[in-house]
Amino acid sequence: MRRVGAGAYVPVQLDLLEARQVVQDPWILVPTLFSPCYIGGRTAAEHWDLTEQIFRDVLVYTARAIPSRTVERQGAIFTLRHIKEELIFGTKTVWRGHTRVAVSDVHRTIIDMLADPTVGGGIQHVSECFANYLQRKDADPRALIEYALKNGNGAIFKRLGFLAERHEKGRYIAREAARHLTKGHAKLDPSLSCPRLVTRWRLRVPESWAQEKHD
């Protein structure tokens, strides 16, 4: 066994006991270090082939108290987001060697990135992932609406509807999103300047996004 954190140990091969880095797949560290948790955001998007981009960090949602949003272990960087344990839903179990790891399913991955575009690498990348999602055979608009309702973040429906109406396959999603709009305005991406208001979605967007016919 090798210690990988406070009170956290993982099994290693005997011939690696003296090595500084004993884990090649950082995913196997996630349950030990951060449980209850799941891998999500841009890392899950990469796993589900929603994107061809490769990200250096592993994004983890955890119900544990997190003194720091970034943790480095065994040469891997983990970006952490705190979440209430009751909001851990919509996950799949994947096996990495002999380790069971929870990862957000493809629908929850989209919802998490809409709740906080920074976990998806920014709204442009989130938009591309969403477009790819709509082309998948396992795309499930009803699951998106159900997960968004369960998440309880009103900004999700504003971003979801705004993006969905740009796609022919997003018409049902846009209609349902419009039914669940909350009061107040949200930003398409809180990390960007969003001076333009798209009134029907109660959403502030950057100038570059407002130039298209969505006013």
Image (cartoon, rainbow, N blue to C red):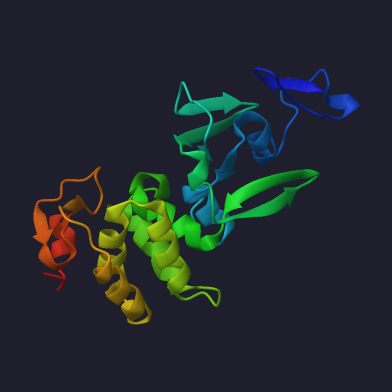
What is the x, y in percent for residue 152? 36, 52
Picture quadrant where residue 148 is located: bottom left
Give the number of callouts. Answer: 0
Asked if residue 18 lies left or right of residue 114, the reply is right
- Quadrant showing the C terminus: bottom left
Residue 199, x across and y down, in percent:
11, 64
Residue closer to the observer: 176 or 191: 176
x%, y% of residue 192?
21, 45
Visible in this render: residue 50? no
Q: Quadrant of residue 134?
A: bottom left
Q: In this view, does 141 lie to the left or right of 201?
A: right
Between 63 and 78, the one nearer to me in the picture = 63
- At horizontal 81% and vertical 44% (from top left) the residue drawn is 98
Report the residue that reaches farthest toward the bottom: 168
Residue at 53%, 26% (x, y): give it: 71
Residue 108 image position (x, y, % from top left): 49, 57
Q: Is 66 located above or below residue 206 in the figure?
A: above
Above-or-below relation of 38 to 146: above
Q: Between residues 7 and 29, which one lies in front from this camera angle?
A: 7
Q: Which residue occupies the extreme right position in the image? A: 14
Q: Can residue 62 be seen in this view?
A: yes
Q: In which quarter of the image is the N terminus?
A: top right
Q: Going by the image, does 167 lie left or right of 12?
A: left
Instruction: Please identify the quarter of the rendering in which residue 111 is found.
Output: bottom left
Q: Foreground residue, 172 or 94?
A: 172
